[in-house]
Amino acid sequence: MAGERIAKGNPFDAASFFLIIMDKIEKLTKKIVAFRDARDWKQFHNPKDMALSLTLEAAEVLEHFQWKDALEVEKYVGTHRAEIGEELADVLYWVLLLSHDLGIDILDAMEKKGAKNEAKYPVEKAKGNHKKWDKLLMRQVIVESPFAGDEKRNIEYGRQCLRDCLMRGEAPIASHLLYTQDGILDDGITAERALGIEAGLDWGRFAEATVVYADYGITPGMRLGILRAKREGRPVETRKLFQKSYRKAI
């Protein structure tokens, strides 16, 4: 196979291999679409029913392995490889047909998904580990704590909040502590304060939760963060350092 020739170091580069695969996928998709259209079946093919058909065909693959242990599966595959291949072909049929009808470049989608998986499952953490990506990586959280007012006390408190997050195995960010450092933004200037708040809230799109440290109450700036989190569907958790408690924010 072409992939084996690449692995063995033959003068057959990966780009050429990709072009061959792309050509095969395009030809196969055209053949499938022609088969469907020659029978006037497109009238029955809406995305929902096509997705259902894909799921049902995948279930038929699974049926081959139902109620069999590892040894039975190995023996079964040896005598039923062709039948399993047909079921997998049915799955591929619906994958290609559905992606065609939805205008999705399936190879491009695979490339992009592969890149995401590379980031989600770094080798040094995922190798030999079956855990889902969100259990492998540190939980990313936005920290909401007071800043304005007694800045000295609030900065020290904010640092304690960050430590608390880290001790929980989280990767926290507290933009009100980061952007207000000397030489970055001046919290006493309204426009710069607003810029810092917006930058911190925008980062929230990548966070898994907003954690609110409420030992000194909830300030207006913290309320903005809570509202933004709720609007974006991000969980909000309230914590206290001095009275050990943990609950979902209202």
Image (cartoon, helix red, strand yellow):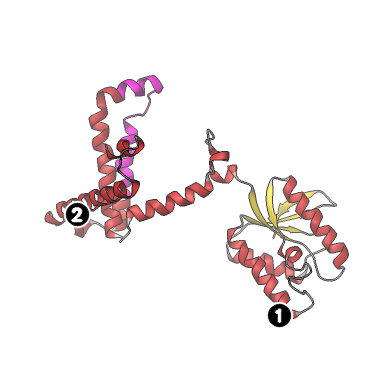
Residue name at image x 78 percent, y 67 percent: 181
Circle 2 residues within 10 Å: few <14, some 14–19, many ≥20: some
Residue denoted by label 1: 191
Q: x%, y% of residue 75?
A: 32, 20
Who is closer to the viewer here, 125 or 232? 125
Q: Give how far apart the Cα atoms at labels 2 and 1 are.
A: 57 Å
Reply yes or no: does residue 60 show up in magenta: yes
Disc 2 or 1, which lies upstream in sequence? 2
Q: x%, y% of residue 241?
A: 82, 52
Task: Quadrant for the N terminus, please.
Answer: top left
Q: x%, y% of residue 167?
A: 75, 45
Who is closer to the viewer here, 138 or 36? 138
The secondary element bearing badge 1 is classed as: helix
Residue name at image x 48 percent, y 51 percent: 116
Q: Amino acid at mark 2?
A: Lys
Q: Amino acid at mark 1?
A: Ala
Residue name at image x 32 percent, y 57 percent: 105
Residue denoted by label 2: 30
